[in-house]
Amino acid sequence: MTTKRTTTARKPAVATAKKPKAVKAAKSAKPTSARAKGGRRKVALITGVTGQDGAYLSELLLSKGYEVHGIKRRSSLFNTDRIDHLYHDMHEKGRPFHLHYGDLTDSVNCLRLVKEIQPDEIYNLAAMSHVAVSFEMPEYTANADGIGTLRFLEAIRILGMEKKTRFYQASTSELYGGVLPRAQNEETPFYPKSPYGVAKLYGFWITKNYRESYNMFACNGILFNHESPLRGETFVTRKITRAVAKIKLGLQDVLYLGNLDAKRDWGHAKDYVEGMWRMLQAKKPDDFVLATGKTYTVRHFIDLAFSEVGVKLEWKGKGVKEKGIDKKTGKVMVAIDPRYYRPAEVDHLEGDPSKAKRVLGWKHTYDLKALVKEMVQSDLELFKRDVYLKKGGHKILHEQE
């Protein structure tokens, strides 16, 4: 059943900031099939629809004429901020966007939803995706991220939908974990270093196993870090851009982080959901790395973010004593808090997207500077309301994690 929301359509949350100029993509032949056999509208089922990727993927599929069904978890608070602008009145006939309650840990519900919706494509994006939290919740992470994948594959098999339904599994660069510091591709051996990575490793292999055992059209997308203004507030990139905006507006004094030397390959989520879709339009199922092919330290990301608000940082000290200091004022802007170190650090992640470029015609369009600019500008707009509240004598919330 659909959720009982009657919210009218409104502008996307990302519309607050002017989109920076992106890197021009290489020309390639784009897949155009948005209709199933018989000419009917394609039906897609998205788990994790309320997350960053789910929101962007929903927008993409709706723009291509799909009927989109999303699964969201029950919450005592509304958790649909990222997709509220996609809502239609539930009484409107022929509306293309539907929400259903569900959870990857509930096999009966997963089976029921697949049977009722009869999707042409399933995008399994839902996960307990916070690496640090997975060390505190390893059992739930394994259940949701690992066995949750199996539940949907089994639903397809049990219902005899192997020839009808194509399946996308959201894999992750965390599968590589402790491999040597070089570009990682589809042939690089895995070495996950977190409960999240280990759970996702099971999801990867069970997807590959069902593809080979039951002739399913099932793909693994090994996506490297991808960010946007819709990124969750507790992920390091969004934590940085939120803090930079709040410091600029006088709402925060210092940004506390952990390992600044960690290197990541960062892209924009909009580019990566396009890659997901392309995988399921291919002639045959396969596994693909999506990445930019460039890696930067967390420290460099911080430098770019502060430069967007006119602050140039000077780094002093080493290890836990390292600090980022405003070169102009001498004020400490960034400091280290050991609590943010992981039990097992992943030092270097860098993807090689050559196969996706060659087979799918996919290429990232945002460079890191454009991505950071969009995120900082969006957070500046977001926190202007707190400035107004503070000036009016009202208390404002200080979310910290």
Image (cartoon, helix red, strand yellow):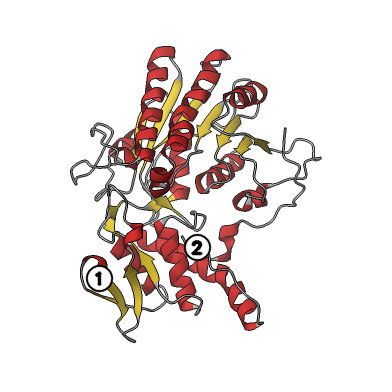
In the picture provided, is 308 more to the left or to the right than 77? Answer: left
Taking the image as shown, residue 265 lies to the left or right of residue 127, namely left
Type of amino acid at the residue the image marks with label 2: Lys
Separation (CA) of disc 1 from disc 2: 37 Å
Furthest toward the right, the residue is: 91
Q: Is residue 72 visible?
A: yes
Residue 166 in the image: above or below residue 361: above
Residue to which mark 1 is pinned = 321
Q: Is disc 1 placed on a helix, strand or loop?
A: helix
Q: Does residue 30 appear anywhere in the picture?
A: no
Residue under the image location 56 percent in, 71 percent down: 383
Q: Which residue is mark 2?
A: 19
User: Which one is in front, 194 or 123?
Assistant: 194
The earlier-in-sequence mark between 1 and 2 is 2
Task: Say which of 337 and 285 sits in front.
Answer: 337
- Which circle marks residue 265 in the picture? none
